[in-house]
Each structure stands twice: as structure tokens, then as C-alpha cells.
Image: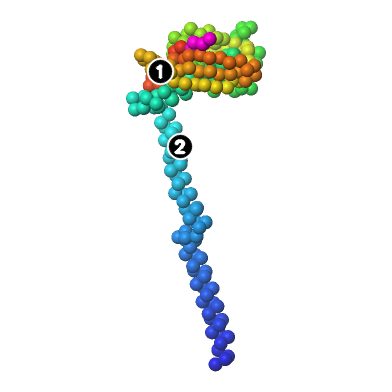
Amino acid sequence: MKKYWKYIILVLIIVGVIIAFNSKNFEEEFGNTPNNNTNSNSNVNSPKRDNISENKNENESVDLTKLTEEEKNELGKEKVEGFLKIYRNESPKGILVSLGLLEPNHEFSPEDYIDRIYAKTNIKYNDFKSKMLSYMDESLFSQYFDNLGFKESDGLLAVSDIGEIVKTYEVTSLEFVENQEDKKIYNIEFKDVDSGEIEKAQISVIESNNTYVVDKYEKLI
């Protein structure tokens, strides 16, 4: 009988190894280990995050009629901040950079100049104007920014290559004040980072093409 014990023990060892192997395969296949649970959740949640991101991009154009008053006030603030990036640039080139129409390190070549001051870009003038009108109304554009070192040349935008590219500032306060007829009124305060100079202003926005645009900028004493 003793001589069979060795065979019995060997068989038990083999059976144990087979059971352990099958158990591991089962866990890997159905995700019962803690690590696999983590991976499984990650795979389930990833498409949801992607969908949220995609929906956000698709819904960039909002319907004002479906927004709450608070959401409208926040949208107005966003447009004020976007307008400020244009207003605080003291060069036409800097404005184009802030609009994403020109690279910060762009250099004009001698053949780009149509006279001693203006250099022609490859930007369509209508594209430039459309971009500007997404932050301000036609009246404000015509009265001020249209003459601020920009002009049309053969359908393209010509720009005066003078002044600083970017002026650094810090918004210290931006508050919604009131609804006034068809306008939203905001008070803003910002500081020039380099000089420390503070400027206060009242800005109004109006509804245009299912969004808000700035129609007036008035400095406050």
C-alpha cells in the first residue's frame, strides 16, 4: 500500500495545479479581480466622457431662449472678457493674435507691405470682420476698431504693423449690474500687470445673432 502513496500524492498535486489554473482563467475572463474591475469600469466610463466632450463642442452655439437669467448673465460676462482681450491690445497685430487669426511670432516680409505702414495678410477681410462682430456690434466696430490700423486690400486684410503685441492685465472685478431695456450692464475693473495702473469701466452688451456682443465701453472715474 505504501508504494501507492507516492502516486496518490502526485495525482493530488496535479489536480490542485489544474484547479488553480482554471480559476485564474475564469477570473481573467469575467473580471473578478480588483484590477480587472478597475479596468472594466474605465472602459465603461470612457465613452461617456468622450460623449460629454463631443456634446459640449456640438452645443457651443446656444439658444438664448432656453437659458436661465443667471446663465444669460454668465454668457454676457464671457463676451465681456473676450472683448477685453481685443480692447487691451494696443496694436493691430496683437488684436489678430488674440483673435487666433495670426501667430504671435509672425513676421511680415518686405513684399507684404502695400505702403510704408500697412502689410497685407492672407486673412480675408470678411473673416476678420466676422470674428470681430462676434464680440462687438457693427456700430462699435465701425466707430473705433475698423480704423485702428486695419483696412481692406483686394478682399484681404491689411494691417499696420506697429505697437506692442500683447498687454498683460488682470481682471480684479467683473460684476453684472442690471438689465436695462434690451441691454445687460456690467462693471469691470482690471489692472495692468506691468505698471499696476487700474482701469474701471461700465460695459453694456446686447443680443445679436443668438448671443451677446458689446455695444458700449465707458471708462469710469
Calculate the distance from the C-alpha at mark 1 to the C-alpha at mark 2: 33 Å
Q: Amino acid at mark 2?
A: Ser
Percent across and percent down for residue 121 are 57, 16
Q: According to the image, label 2 marks what residue?
A: 53
Answer with the quarter of the image where residue 30 lies.
bottom left
- Dominant SS type (magenta): strand
Seen from this angle, which residue lies furthest bottom?
1
**Magenta-drawn stretch contains 23:** no
**Residue drawn 48% across the image and 63% down it:** 27
Q: According to the image, label 1 marks what residue?
A: 178
- Of marks 1 and 2, the one in the foreground: 1
Height in image: 85 above or below 20? Answer: above
Q: Nearer the viewer, residue 62 or 198?
A: 198
Which residues are the magenta region? 217-221
Percent across and percent down for residue 160 are 59, 11
Image quadrant in which the N terminus is located: bottom right
Answer with the quarter of the image where residue 215 lies.
top left
Q: Nearer the viewer, residue 211 or 81?
A: 81
- Regarding mark 1 in the picture, which secondary structure is present there? strand
